[in-house]
């Protein structure tokens, strides 16, 4: 057997898949991997089904169907007040994951430095390493997730090629403020670096806070692209339709990477996503309201059980400090005990850190689930903690 690629052979299966498999194995309520348990708008599914039956079903244009690229450009005008040219500034990919891969492969050369902010979404570091990039980590910590400006400044050098930013941030639920974004943009301008902003949770924001796209900062526009995901915006994570929008000079090499990665994305889904982006404001308001109610429901349940629940401004996740509970020394231990014994799956927050000594007392709970499912999770945790659970096991 010849040796296989050292980077991919050396890393474990992603924590999201691991926790979903464990959830299945233990018949657990799955608050681990981030996906809604109710599909998005029926009208979009019907439209996609009709397009599948009636076509087109052959290769769409490599950069994406014009109808979707136009809808993406219109949605940046509508939601961000930003004008982009759909022909030179938008491409469609098979999910945000492909978009991230295309951006990294299209923009960096081996030996280039890439600034990544911890907590990191799972694919960032392996993709940068596989492309030969050198990772410079900057750490944000729970529960406040403050951007450490001096550490950020220190991560830049003459070799910095790119900053990869996740805003709103998974798992932190943090939305970067305009001053924070300006610091990042200024540093990138100073060092002539690109910005790739993974903005997949752009529409899942709470408490009246508006998402600030990197494309809305005038000084960022010439050096930035923003990534979107229809899976998140329309609650159909299996659709895998992503978008990359931004500086035309960046889109060109990113499209070259896309043409040799997937080349294109299923046309019926592209057509349905174009329709989705034209949905009225009531759709976009309702998804925010619905998710924030779920956030509050789960937060109340966890707080009553003595988890210390952090704030969540956006996305699908609550991070809870379990230090007051006797459920494990580390988040990995607590997470394993919980899925096995309480039958509730979560994700350890340390899985989002690559550097040494990550935070070890936080679990990520996904709340984009039906109310009955959230309630069942709390009931199971209550029973475990207060009746059968780790206390009983310890004293017994
Ligand atoms: N980026 C972040 C921060 C995510 O949480 C996800 C989750 N799915 C993705 C990218 C990937 O999106 P997609 O499913 O469209 O590939
Ligand atoms: N983004 C999802 C999460 O954070 C997982 C997506 C995946 O498993 N690739 O849980």
Image (cartoon, grey):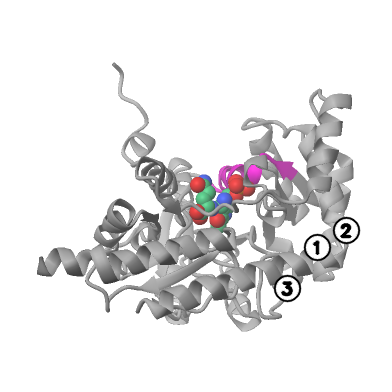
In the image, residue 277 sits, relative to residue 222, either above or below, namely above
Distance CA(mark 3)–CA(mark 2):
18 Å
Relative placement, left or right, of 356 versus 263 is left
Residue 264: mark in rendering: none
Which contiguous range is marked in magenta? 92-108
Relative placement, left or right, of 4 versus 161 is left
Mark closer to the observer (3, 1): 1
Rendering coords of residue 212 (x, y %): 70, 73
Disc on the earlier residue, 2 or 1: 2
Helix, strand or loop for disc 3: loop
Name the residue tied to disc 2: 74
Name the residue tied to disc 1: 283
Q: Nearer the viewer, residue 91 or 349?
A: 349
Mark closer to the observer (2, 1): 1
Rendering coords of residue 125 (x, y %): 43, 51
Quarter occupied by the C terminus: bottom left
Helix, strand or loop for disc 2: helix
Quarter occupied by the N terminus: top left
Residue plotted at (54% across, 66% down) = 169
The residue furthest top is: 1
The residue furthest front is: 387
Mark closer to the observer (3, 2): 2
* Label 3 crowd bin: few (<14), some (14–19), many (20+), radius 10 Å: some
From the image, give the main secondary structure of the stretch colored magenta. helix
The residue furthest bottom is: 179
Rendering coords of residue 198 (x, y %): 61, 58
* Label 2 crowd bin: few (<14), some (14–19), many (20+), radius 10 Å: many
In the image, residue 229 sits, relative to residue 59, either above or below, namely below
Distance CA(mark 2)–CA(mark 1):
16 Å
Residue 217: mark in rendering: 3
């Amino acid at each position: 057997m010849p040796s296989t690629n050292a980077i991919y052979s050396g890393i474990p299966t992603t924590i999201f898949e691991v926790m979903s498999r464990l959830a299945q194995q233990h018949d657990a309520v799955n608050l681990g991997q981030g996906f809604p348990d109710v599909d998005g708008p029926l009208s979009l599914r019907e439209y996609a089904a009709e397009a599948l039956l009636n076509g087109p079903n052959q290769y769409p244009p490599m950069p994406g169907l014009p109808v979707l690229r136009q809808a993406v450009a219109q949605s940046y005008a509508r939601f961000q007040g930003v004008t982009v040219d759909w022909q030179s500034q938008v491409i469609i990919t098979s999910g945000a994951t492909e978009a991230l891969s295309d951006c990294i492969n299209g923009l960096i050369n081996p030996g280039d430095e890439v600034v990544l902010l911890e907590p990191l979404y799972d694919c960032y570091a392996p993709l940068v390493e596989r492309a030969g990039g050198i990772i410079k980590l900057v750490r944000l910590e729970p529960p406040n997730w403050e951007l450490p400006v001096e550490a950020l400044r220190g991560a830049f050098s003459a070799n910095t090629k790119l900053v990869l930013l996740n805003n709103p941030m998974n798992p932190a639920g943090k939305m970067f403020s305009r001053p924070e974004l300006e610091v990042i943009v200024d540093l990138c301008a100073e060092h002539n670096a690109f910005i790739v902003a993974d903005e997949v949770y752009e529409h899942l924001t709470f408490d009246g806070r508006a998402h600030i796209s990197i494309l809305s900062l005038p000084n960022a526009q010439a050096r930035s692209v923003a990534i979107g995901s229809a899976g998140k915006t329309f609650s159909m994570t299996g659709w895998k339709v992503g978008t990359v929008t931004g500086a035309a000079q960046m889109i060109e090499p990113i499209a070259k990477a896309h043409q040799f990665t997937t080349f294109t994305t299923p046309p019926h889904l592209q057509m349905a996503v174009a329709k989705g982006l034209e949905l009225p404001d009531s759709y976009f308001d309702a998804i925010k309201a619905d998710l924030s109610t779920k956030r509050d429901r789960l937060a109340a349940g966890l707080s009553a059980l003595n988890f210390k629940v952090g704030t969540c401004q956006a996305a699908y996740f609550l991070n809870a400090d379990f230090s007051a509970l006797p459920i494990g020394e580390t988040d990995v231990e607590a997470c394993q005990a919980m899925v096995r014994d309480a039958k509730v799956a979560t994700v350890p927050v340390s899985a989002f850190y690559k550097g040494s000594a990550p935070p070890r007392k936080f679990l990520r709970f996904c709340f984009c689930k039906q109310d009955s499912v959230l309630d069942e999770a709390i009931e199971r945790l209550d029973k475990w903690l207060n009746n059968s659970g780790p206390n009983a096991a310890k004293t017994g």
